[in-house]
Image (cartoon, rainbow, N blue to C red):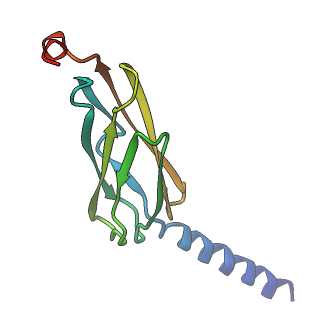
Amino acid sequence: MKTKLLMLIAVLTVSLAMQAEKFPQIKFEQTTIDLGTFSLDEPVRKCTFKFTNVGKGKLVINAVRTSCGCTVADYPKDFISPGASGEITVTYDGSNKMPGRFKKSVQIFSNCKEDMTRIFIQGEMTDVPVSKKSKK
């Protein structure tokens, strides 16, 4: 009886270990993108985060949340096969925001073993140039 119980525990342990290896894993080329310095008269900036599923299971991005309403992210809704790549496009809109440095986060929720990953955008928005102000 003990032998059968030990065998059952061993089989369950091995099967759980094998399932753990089948997780997808998201790997970004960059986790922070600097949008540089731009002026308030052109407050919208876009950037693209490229990633690869370096795991052994199909990657599904369940949700993406941004740290504020001035940032929007577009992400793939279909699964990403092992070895395949994808992109998350992030748009920052500084309209009606105060000039200055900023850093915004984007949380990616997926079916990876670590179910949440963060990426960041940063930059500096300056006041409208004097030459543009005088034309108004």
Question: Residue at position x 15%, y 12% from top?
Answer: 134
The C terminus lies in quadrant: top left
Q: Relative to residue 64, is residue 93 depicted above or below?
A: above
Count of all numbered marks drawn on residues in the image? 0
Residue closer to the observer: 12 or 62: 62
Quarter of the view holding residue 19: bottom right
Question: Residue at position x 26%, y 60% from top?
Answer: 85
Left or right: 78 with respect to 41? right
Left or right: 33 with respect to 65? left
Q: Locate residue 113, reporting x and y percent.
A: 54, 59
Residue closer to the observer: 78 or 24: 78
Quarter of the view holding residue 87: bottom left
Q: Locate residue 75, reporting x and y percent.
A: 35, 59
Q: Locate residue 96, reporting x and y percent.
A: 38, 30
Q: Relative to residue 44, is residue 16 depicted above or below?
A: below
Residue closer to the observer: 80 or 4: 80
